[in-house]
Image (cartoon, rainbow, N blue to C red):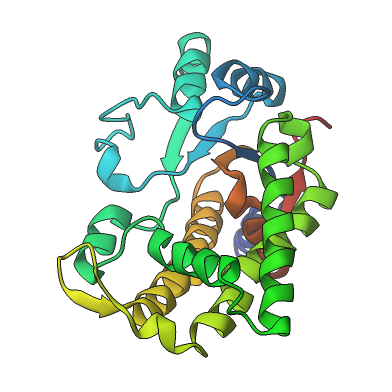
């Protein structure tokens, strides 16, 4: 009888420990960065941010294709983030790296005919604006978007703290709403966007069809994939302190989605 009670107590203890491990809060610092140097942000400033945070795990805006089976990078790019991570690993070789990008991003874009940007669509929007062909409502939307974009450029030339705060996240949310949702309203309602272009596969496609496909991938599919990969990675690893280094255009979306979908992840700013 005593043996049975002892076994039961042991099982209850193990179950309690397991539940505690599953429910424990993990810390995630999301560093919004720029890929190439500006007057205020470069690989040195990103390195100093990593050094301040001292993460156990660094999550990178890459997919698994760019890592080997031991999660070492196959190629170290000249981008700010890669250079900063390389420098940090020299003195902290036990730091774990993990990819969180949309799996097969580049090959997927090619497969569906997308470029990284929708330059020809925005060029057409600018042409219509300059020619005075927008309705008053469309002109208001375009002007608001243009003013937001100027503000965005100034932020990327400032410093990391300017990019990584609640106020900038709110501004970015508004910018992206205009860049994607409000622009789509114009594109979908004007005949000029039936004009044909060649997509990345060399196929003929209308500007409107291209923009809708591009917006769906860049705004929703890609960001949501990163959010899912972040949550899955944090839940699978036993570590407690994680740092995500990602282009600052993605930060606002990831933060908002994580707050909703993963309350067990504690979000902290790098400068705190």
- Could you tell me which quadrant the N terminus lies in? bottom right
Identify which residue is drawn at 78% across, 36% down: 162
Location of residue 213 (image quadrant): bottom left
Q: Nearer the viewer, residue 27 or 169?
A: 169
Q: Can you see residue 33?
A: yes
- Above-or-below relation of 159 to 240: above
Identify which residue is drawn at 59% across, 19% down: 47
The residue most toward the top is 91
Q: Is residue 112 left or right of residue 217?
A: left
Q: Can you see residue 264?
A: no
Q: Is residue 62 left or right of residue 200?
A: right
Q: Is residue 95 left or right of residue 25?
A: left
Q: Nearer the viewer, residue 242 or 200?
A: 200
Q: Nearer the viewer, residue 138 or 89?
A: 138
- Above-or-below relation of 213 to 264: below
Q: Position of residue 246 (x, y in %)?
A: 55, 43
Q: Is residue 147 left or right of residue 186?
A: right
Q: Nearer the viewer, residue 138 or 81?
A: 138
Location of residue 82 (image quadrant): top left
Identify which residue is drawn at 80% across, 44% down: 165
Q: Position of residue 89 (x, y in %)?
A: 47, 17
- Above-or-below relation of 133 to 78: below
The residue most toward the front is 131
Q: Position of residue 215 (x, y in %)?
A: 47, 71
Identify which residue is drawn at 69% across, 75% down: 139
């Amino acid at each position: 009888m005593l043996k049975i009670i002892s076994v039961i107590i042991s099982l209850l203890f193990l179950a309690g420990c397991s539940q505690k491990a599953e429910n424990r809060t993990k810390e995630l610092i999301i560093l919004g960065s720029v890929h190439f140097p500006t007057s205020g942000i470069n690989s040195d400033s990103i390195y100093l941010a990593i050094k301040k945070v001292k993460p156990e795990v660094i999550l990178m805006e890459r997919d698994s294709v760019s890592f080997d089976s031991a999660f070492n990078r196959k190629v170290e790019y000249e981008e700010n983030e890669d250079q900063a991570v390389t420098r940090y690993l020299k003195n902290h070789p036990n730091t774990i790296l993990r990819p969180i990008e949309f799996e097969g991003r580049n090959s997927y874009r090619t497969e569906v005919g997308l470029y990284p940007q929708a330059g020809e669509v925005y060029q057409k929007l600018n042409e219509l604006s300059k020619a005075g062909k927008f309705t008053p409502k469309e002109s208001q939307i375009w002007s608001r978007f243009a003013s937001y974009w100027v503000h965005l450029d100034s932020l990327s030339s400032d410093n990391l703290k300017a990019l990584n705060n609640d106020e900038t996240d709110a501004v970015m949310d508004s910018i992206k709403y205009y860049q994607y949702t409000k622009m789509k309203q114009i594109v979908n309602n004007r005949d000029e966007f039936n004009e044909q272009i060649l997509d990345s596969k060399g196929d003929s496609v209308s500007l409107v069809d291209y923009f809708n496909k591009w917006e769906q991938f860049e705004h929703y599919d890609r960001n949501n994939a990163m959010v899912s990969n972040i949550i899955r990675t944090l839940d699978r690893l036993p570590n407690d302190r994680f740092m995500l280094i990602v282009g600052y255009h993605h930060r606002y979306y990831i933060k908002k989605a994580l707050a909703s979908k993963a309350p067990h992840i504690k979000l902290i700013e790098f400068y705190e």
